[in-house]
Image (spheres, rainbow, N blue to C red):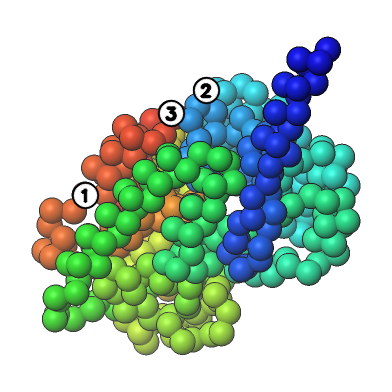
Amino acid sequence: MKRFLTALCLLLPFVVQAKTLTDSLQRQVEVPDNPQRIVIGESRMIYTLALVEDGNPAKRVVGWPADLRNLDKQTWQRYVKAFPAIANIEQIGNSNFSQLNVEKIIALRPDLVILPVYARTPPNNSLFMQQLAASKIPVLFLDFRVDPLANTVASLRTLGEALNDQAKSERFIAFYQQHMQFIRDRLAGWKGPRPKVMLQLHLGKKAECCTTVAHGNLADLIAFAGGDNIAAGRFPAVFGQLNPEAVLAANPDIYIATGSAGPEDKAFLQLGPQVNAASAQATFIRALAQDGTVSVLNAVQQQKAFAFWQNFYMSPWHLLVAEFFAKTFHPDLFHDLSPDETLREMNQQFLPIPETGTYWTHN
């Protein structure tokens, strides 16, 4: 018994040891050393976890909302097939922060809650946060999409430290920085024009024209990759609408859309891990033709219309968007840049299951 108590005393510091981390809201958060019961505020955070966790990226997750199942069935199906335990993770809400069930979260007794920083819903100091604080549950906010250029590396580093697996997160950080720096260096000496770019989110899914991004988020990636966003300065929010008159008057040199429909969703732009190249291009061309505003743009008429997978925007996978933008905006300058090759490298070096499918297309 004496030996047992001695051993237990030696182990206790490691069991209760905690660390203080700085999250994306500049909050100092004390988290346990090696959390094993984690709740995440967005199940599509699996994209990021897959880059920094070995094996099942959700192996520590005990609760999450249903956004992955509802909004990215392609990835959901692939990961459930590879890791069946994912299907049994407790659902704590539907598809956004405001719908998270705090009572369910508390009942799961998590060591840690990780929440995304949203463009539309500033969650700090809410009743939700007060209830978690009262239950002594630490909460980290991470940002990969509101201000991706400023916050991605720090958020990855914080995530790696929180998971007590800095080695793999640092490997991906180095990979990410190398690829982003390649674009930055190549454009540093560029004296040529920046093409006018129109970005339309969710092509074909909304009746009105045209949902886009004015600043932050994908707008920052357009500027980073050497494009001139026609929505810049048009409205104060991150997301907003460009009316048809503004779109036609801007006359963009390049048109870019996003989409994420799967093979079974015949009515919309198909892109993602289960979509083949022919279906992606065919559904893109059809969606363009059905949009009375964008179909008459010179960029579309001159076959300078492109599309990429919508879900890239919310994780460090946006480095592929940055490369896709750079290659699209300046094909001669970036003749040796290949987002497809970068994806292959990510498959080989980081991902638990290889990403297949089609993530970009053109008309």
Query: Residue under circle 2?
Result: 82
Question: Which residue is located at x 74 percent, y 32 percent?
Answer: 12
Q: Report the residue at 31% width, 42% height from top.
A: 343
Q: Are marks 3 and 2 in contact (CB under 8 Å)?
A: yes
Instruction: Identify the residue position indicated by label 1 in the image.
Output: 338
Could you tell me which residue is drawn at 64 percent across and 55 percent down?
A: 20
Q: CA distance from mark 3 to mark 2?
A: 8 Å
The amino acid pointed to by label 3 is Ile
First in residue order: circle 3 vs circle 2: 2
**In-image side of 350 versus 111 (left or right):** left
Percent position (x, y) of residue 59? 61, 30
Position of residue 164 in the picture relative to residue 63 (left or right): left
Q: Secondary structure at mark 2?
A: helix
Q: Which of marks 1 and 2 precedes in the sequence?
A: 2
Disc 1 + disc 3, Cβ < 8 Å: no
The residue labelled by disc 3 is 353
Dot 3 crowding, Cα within 10 Å, few <14, some 14–19, many 20+: some
Q: Is residue 303 above or below residue 37?
A: below
Give the crowd class for mark 1: few <14, some 14-19, many >=20 residues within 10 Å: some
Q: Is residue 153 left or right of residue 103?
A: left
